[in-house]
Image (tube, coloured by chain):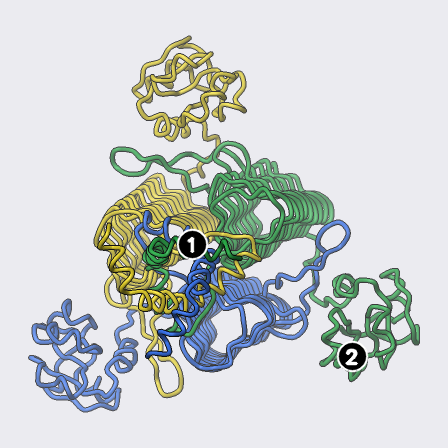
Chain colours: A green, B blue, C yellow
């Protein structure tokens, strides 16, 4: 429970209305009822604003006149929503303390206020800094470092030698530091290449569930501070991902690729190995990146969705593109003189 | 062990042959031997039927005359196969009881006939109904509800507040209720948005291994009753998936998208966020869905597989499609009068 | 620590330099310092070779003259690198022994020198051969077989009846033997088909993290010896993957497909079910395989990445391919006589 006045003050924002109004929850404009705060982040919801039953709304000053209830003014209501969302998170952080079923090597160093859940295993030489939360079933190999206030959700596996910064979060069933996919051909099949590098993760890195970040072959795989990864992402060995780059679900990045800062990769994007992508590049969903990109901007590949029957014909025409080109060339050749004349006339 | 007569009776079907014939296993027509029951679900296997050594075959009446052995008649032999397959499942269901290594909050409510395996963790306020099976290493957060006869395979992680219906199955290493991928830009990078919603899953929902269903930002992510998800699927926050919709491996669905009932999404399909797909839509493999679909039917995108050298040329031609169009337009313009005349003659 | 002479001898190679030189690490040519061995596997790094500060370099005889330091001669330096990498792997193999928190059925058979970590669960009838390493939190169902010297990383789940050969490695959070995605339509929705088969995995199979290999419906899903799978791969029920085939990250293969030996599938490739791919087929990244392939070679599908604005136009042109074809045909028809004449003249 927080009052309108307290909430506005905590966000550093001004408000209009009853400062002692109690706010119990956060909901969208359509759903919000008495006691809920809401927000307007997109002008397309102004109609919902006009009908809202929220107790108060966070909005841009431009829309204050449409608001039938108390409001908080923000130049960036979506960011304000992100900030205030944390006040209404009722989920319980695991209490500090080490569960007696945890299995820890004798030389593990544990900071203050750390929570270690049931069945956690921690290998020799590992350092866990202050206020870290390690939930049930997590495995930390030897010589791992976990920075302060980082949280590992249940059943995460961190291999030996991985270093994680502060205020990171890794969701359940993700795997950090498994071997990169490195093999050489030998006369009988594949010879495994020992993956001798590690994974180096900066601060405030957020990693979704069931995501994999492989350890380097030689040298580290690197996620810079502020990187955010969604669920089911795969980062190959020795990749380097720049600050604040955001990678959506099911993206796969092959080994040794470098991605700059402030990039966004939408869902299911695939990036080949050993290339370099500069800062501020945005790839739309399912995009396939086969070459380095040295110019900021938005890039796409693929074709549109069609009715299946139409697509069958389009697919066949695609396969005939060489032939279509030859047919056009033949026409042009036949009528070369006439066309030149036409162009000349223009 | 079951007899032909018992099996036919249990399926509510008629049969031809020796009622006391003992059936010990289930196998395809080519592989089946003495003691095995088999089935014919596709006319292309009639040749296999004629040579089968099965003890009995489930088949449509149209094919009874080709069958050299005892048979059971079914209007839908594939469905009958699904039904009878359960009689031959020799895997052992974990026995009821709570393993002493389980770690449960004091206020957890456990129904009758429940099986809770080793190292399971269950948070405060969680309710586990009758005959639920929770296998080793599963984590249930606080305030979770698990409906009767639902089964969770090893190392599944269910976050706080997730509600699961009856007769569901979630395979190993899947994660239900991790945070949705919600962040707002702040001056320094990304501001996390607390994901305050949950996940609401109906009855008879089947979820494969290593699949992720994220919790809602505000309000729930919803899987209606009868939904089936394969392995490695990702369902973003606040998606709503309609009844009996089937989603194959490696599909990714971005946040806040609504998918109707009785849809099928083939492997690796990607669906953008904030769109709506109506009932009875089918998307073929790797299809990319960027816009809402309001008409039932089958949809596809992408291009065919080619020999790589051919594809290199086709890819280049694709990149020249604007130019090809201009060349055709130039030809048309040059010969406009003649073409009109030609069309006029037709 | 190993000397140059010992290392060359262990690889069966000749060397030039000081045999007692101590080699403490392995690094790339640019990074290597005193005490490091390095390698030259690609002529594009000759400039790095000339400037290297490595203690010794493994290289092809053709490049020995460019090497400023000691060297080991190899006809295949990349393979030599793979072999020597293992000498510098300082990660600690878990010691033999059974952790007292392990939960094992009374009839489990454990070989010699086996390591079983904390919280491991092993079902009835399972056989674990000599020198197997099973790390923390792994679950093995009933009647599983694990061949000698195989290693299972933390939180791997192996369902009942799965058989694994010798010298395999399965990385963390992977799931082997979950139910295949088999359902039949019934009047109310989907009828689950019990998946009665298993998974049969040969020797020296390497499986990455968070990968899924489903059990067969009838008969086994098969990975032949020498198969290597990266992270986040999905192999559907009853697939058969041939010897030494390599499958990169995020690939999905639908059920009952057979892939030959020595194939490579690059990242995010999708293969439809019930087809057959012959030996020595290579599919490039994101390739979509909808039909059987009976000829060895390299295959691709999809389109190139473009600037988004360009792509919007190309996408629209793709959708007009039928119309482009009609326009060309109309031109050809109009000028049929003239074109025939032209061709006649050539």
B306 to B240, vertically: above or below? above
Can you identify the residue that label 1 sits on?
Answer: C268
Residue A62: percent from left, percent from top:
85, 70
Judged left or right of residue C268, residue B157 is right
Give residue A27's position: percent from left, percent from top.
73, 75
Residue found at x 43% / y 12%: C70
Residue B136 visible? The answer is no
At mark 1, the secondary structure is loop
Quarter assignment of residue C160:
bottom left
Residue indicated by mark 2: A49
**Which of the pair A288/A100 is nearer the observer?**
A288
Chain of the residue under the numbered disc 2 shown in the image: A
Instruction: Residue C195 in the image: state x and y as whole percent.
Output: 31, 69
- Label 2 environment density (alpha carbons within 10 Å; few <14, some 14–19, many ≥20): many
Question: Splitting the image into 4 quarters, where does residue B229 fall?
Answer: bottom left
Above or below residue C66? Residue A296 is: below
Pick the residue in front: C89 or B138: C89
**Badge number at residue A299:** none
Residue B86 visible here: yes
> Which residue is located at x 14 percent, y 74 percent?
B35
Task: Give the CA separation, mark 1 to mark 2.
Answer: 43 Å
In this rendering, the answer to whether C69 lies above or below A124 is above
Q: Nearer the viewer, residue A156 or B119?
A: A156
Q: Position of residue A345 (x, y in %)?
A: 51, 57
The local crowd at label 1, few if under 14, some if 14 to 19, many if 20 or more residues have their Cα within 10 Å, is many
Which chain is disc 1 placed on? C
To which quarter of the image does residue A44 belong? bottom right
């Amino acid at each position: 429970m927080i009052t309108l006045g307290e909430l506005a003050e905590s966000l550093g924002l001004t408000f209009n209305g009853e400062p002692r109004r109690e706010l119990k929850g956060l909901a969208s404009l359509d759903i919000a009822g008495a006691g809920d705060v809401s927000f307007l982040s997109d002008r397309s919801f102004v109609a919902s604003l006009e009908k809202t039953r929220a107790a108060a709304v966070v909005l841009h000053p431009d829309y204050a006149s449409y608001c039938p209830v108390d409001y908080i003014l923000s130049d960036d209501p979506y960011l304000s929503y992100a900030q205030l969302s944390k006040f209404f998170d009722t989920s319980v952080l695991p209490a500090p303390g080490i569960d007696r079923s945890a299995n820890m090597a004798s030389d593990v160093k544990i900071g203050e206020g750390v929570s270690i859940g049931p069945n956690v295993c921690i290998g020799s030489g590992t350092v866990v800094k202050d206020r870290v939360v390690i939930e049930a079933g997590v495995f930390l190999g030897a010589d791992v470092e976990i920075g302060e206030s980082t949280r590992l959700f249940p059943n995460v596996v961190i291999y030996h030698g991985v270093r994680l910064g502060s205020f990171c979060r890794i969701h359940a069933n993700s795997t950090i530091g498994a071997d990169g996919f490195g093999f050489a051909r030998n006369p009988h099949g594949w010879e495994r290449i020992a993956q001798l590098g590690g994974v180096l993760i900066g601060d405030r890195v957020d990693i979704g569930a069931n995501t994999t970040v492989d350890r380097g072959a030689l040298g580290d795989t690197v996620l810079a501070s502020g990187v955010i990864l969604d669920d089911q992402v795969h980062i190959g060995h020795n990749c380097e991902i720049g600050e604040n780059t955001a990678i959506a679900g099911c993206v796969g990045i092959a080994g040794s690729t470098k991605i700059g800062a402030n990039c966004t990769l939408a869902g299911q994007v695939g990036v080949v190995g050993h290339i370099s992508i500069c800062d501020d590049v945005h790839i739309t969903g399912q995009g396939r990146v086969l070459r380095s990109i040295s110019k900021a901007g938005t890039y796409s590949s693929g074709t549109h969705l069609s009715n299946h029957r139409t697509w069958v014909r389009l697919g066949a025409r695609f396969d005939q593109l060489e032939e279509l080109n030859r047919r056009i060339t033949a026409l042009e050749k036949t009528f070369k003189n006439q066309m030149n004349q036409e162009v000349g006339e223009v």
